[in-house]
Amino acid sequence: MANSQETGEGDPGDESTESEQLMAQLSEEENLSPASEQWLRSIPDDPAGLLRRKFQYEQQLYRQQQRFLPPSPTPENSRY
């Protein structure tokens, strides 16, 4: 007979305890002080700017990776 740990099944009570702890932690994080809320409101909300910055960063990474790759063969060098 297989043990629940061997089959990958955990005790259902463990999952509920973990989820209760997570929910308690999330509810604590939602209760911010008025000063924290004011500070968060002062941060500009610019999703387009964030997305633009992400694409710039990914393009920079791509260019850096291409710099270290060996050059691909040109059609003139790869004749039959």
Image: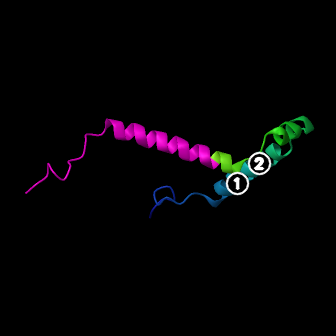
Q: State yes or no: residue 78 in magenta.
A: yes
Residue 11 location in percent, x, y?
Answer: 60, 58
Question: Which residue appears farthest toward the bottom when viewing the image?
Answer: 1
Quadrant in which residue 16 is drawn: bottom right
Badge 2 element: helix
**In the picture, which quadrant includes the N terminus?**
bottom left
State whether the magenta stretch is mostly helix, strand or loop.
helix
Identify the residue position indicated by label 2 in the image.
26
Magenta stretch bounds? 51-80
Eyeballing the image, is 70 above or below 8?
above
**Residue 65 location, x and y as percent?**
38, 39
Which mark identifies residue 19?
1
**Percent from the top left, x then y, of residue 41?**
84, 42
> Label 1 crowding class (10 Å Cα cut-off): few <14, some 14-19, many 20+?
few
Residue 50, x across and y down, in percent: 65, 46
Q: Is residue 10 left or right of residue 28?
A: left
Q: Nearer the viewer, residue 30 or 22?
A: 30
Q: Amino acid at mark 1?
A: Ser
Please tell me whether mark 1 sits on a helix, a strand or a loop. Answer: helix
Q: Are marks 1 and 2 in contact (CB under 8 Å)?
A: no
Tell me the amino acid under the disc marked 2: Leu
In this rendering, the label closer to the viewer, 1 or 2 = 2
Mark 1 vs mark 2, CA separation in Å = 10 Å
Q: Is residue 4 left or right of residue 32?
A: left
